[in-house]
Amino acid sequence: MIDKPVNSKDIDENKLMAALSYIWAFSVVMMLLKKDSPFVQFHARQGFVLFVISVIFMIIAVLWWANIIVAVYCIIGIWSAYQGKEWKAPLIYQIAQKVKF
């Protein structure tokens, strides 16, 4: 999937929404509500992948501790989005590019 160019107006108007998209199921809500914002879509796709990974780690009981890594990724994503930056999360970004809503 090719990312649409992000402009500064989009970033300024949607920083909070992009940051919220890293909080569990909010990623799906943001993908549906903010389809016209490339900045939110960028972060919401990554948030969605992290959400799915977190659920998988919880289902596989021996991997529950790995959610610490997911939480760190989410915190970095929230911080980056709120600062108006596009952080390409290692390993997650490549998967997120394939997410379509």
Image (cartoon, rainbow, N blue to C red):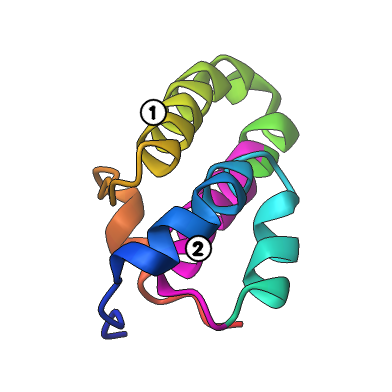
Q: Which mark is residue 76?
A: 1
Membership of 42 in magenta stretch: yes
Query: Would residue 63 be found to the left or right of residue 23 on screen?
Result: left
Residue 55's place in the image compared with 29, above or below, is above
Left or right: residue 75 compared with residue 23: left
Q: Nearer the viewer, residue 8 or 19?
A: 8
Residue 51 rendering spot, x and y as whole percentages: 62, 46
Element on which disc 2 rests:
helix
For image coordinates 29% across by 71% down, the residue present is 7
Image quadrant for the N terminus? bottom left
Q: Residue at x 52, y 16 (%)?
A: 68
Where is residue 93 shown, x and y percent of the image?
31, 56
Are the residues flagged by discs 1 and 2 in contact, CB closer than 8 Å? Answer: no
Q: What residue is disc 2 on?
A: 40
Dominant SS in magenta:
helix
Q: Which mark is residue 22?
A: none
Which of pointers 1 and 2 indicates the residue nearer the eye? 2
Q: Nearer the viewer, residue 54 or 46?
A: 46
* Quadrant placement of the C terminus: bottom right
Task: Give the mark nearest the N terminus, 1 or 2.
Answer: 2
Q: Give the magenta part as a residue range.
A: 36-54
Residue type (three-letter) at the residue carrying disc 1: Ile
Query: Which amino acid type corresponds to the residue marked 2 in the rendered image?
Result: Val
Q: Does residue 3 belong to the magenta stretch?
A: no
